[in-house]
Amino acid sequence: MTGDADKTALDMVYAAQTETELATAYAAWANGYDLETAALGYCLPFVIGSWVARHVPKGEGPLLDAGCGTGLSGPYLGALGYDDIEGLDLSDEMLGLARARGGYRSLTQAALGGPLPWADGHFAAIFSTGVFTAGHAPASSLDELVRITRPDGFVIFTVRDVVLEAGGFRAKFAELEARGRWRAVEESPAFRAFAVAEPDVLVKAYIFRVV
């Protein structure tokens, strides 16, 4: 960590037990979030573009950044030719920073785990990083993300190692496949979410194609 303030902010986020606590933690952290996570070497908002570019052709949109936070991913995907991206986040404060940064056609405040305000099959692909982790969005969020992704579209996301089994993500993957809602395309090896600090924070990337 880079200091006690950084540790407090990150610990508040991981310790959140309810949607309200999580929103409060991110509201308190919003203004310092980018500098503090950059100092830790947080890389997920940038590396997710590799999987998007691998599986989603340019020009197929719209795409949804589910849990976009301060909007780090949007501009970099824009540089790769993806110019029809919408963002979703729980925190109004984080969305304000994403709006100022640019890179998104629209931004919506909503919580993963509940109903989302889009029609069935609205998106060509959905991507999400840093959201399926301790104290954050539940595995049940995937049901709505699949619903709003069009057939043959992709759902691309990372999952923290400590919630993969305990949070019911493996079970949810299998359930959605058994119901004929999606099929597995790719599962990455475990890798570090932070390039500089927190070496024990490991994630995997998953890519599923909606049926």
Image (tube, helix red, strand yellow):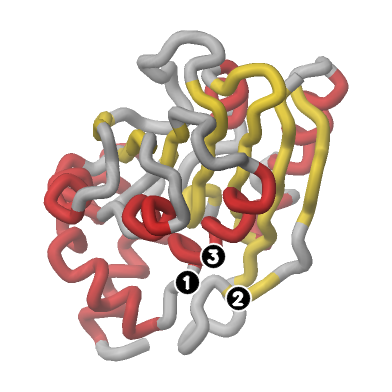
In this rendering, would 4 be left or right of 72? left
- Residue 84 place in picture, x, y as percent: 38, 35
Q: Which residue is drawn at 79% across and 49% down?
A: 186
Figure quadrant of residue 23:
top left
> Which image quarter holds the N terminus?
bottom left
Q: Is residue 139 visible?
A: yes
Figure quadrant of residue 119:
top left
Contact between labelled residues 3 and 1, with CB atoms less than 8 Å apart: yes
Question: Spatial distance from mark 1 to mark 3, Cα to Cα?
Answer: 6 Å
Query: If you read the primary sequence from the N terminus, does the residue marked by circle 3 or circle 2 appear first?
Result: 3
Above-or-below relation of 52 to 210: below
Q: What residue type is labelled 3?
A: Val
Above-or-below relation of 130 to 208: below
In this rendering, would 207 be left or right of 118? right
Which residue lies under the disc numbered 1? 43
Contact between labelled residues 2 and 1, with CB atoms less than 8 Å apart: yes
- Residue 72 place in picture, x, y as percent: 33, 59
Question: Spatial distance from mark 1 to mark 2, Cα to Cα?
Answer: 8 Å
Question: Spatial distance from mark 3 to mark 2, Cα to Cα?
Answer: 11 Å
Q: What residue type is labelled 2?
A: Arg
Q: Residues within 10 Å of mark 3 (few under 14, many from 20)?
A: some
Q: Residue at x 42, y 41 (%)?
A: 65
The count of marks equals: 3
Q: Which residue is drawn at 73% across and 37% down?
A: 208
Q: Residues within 10 Å of mark 1 (few under 14, many from 20)?
A: some
Q: Residue at x 17, y 40 (%)?
A: 92
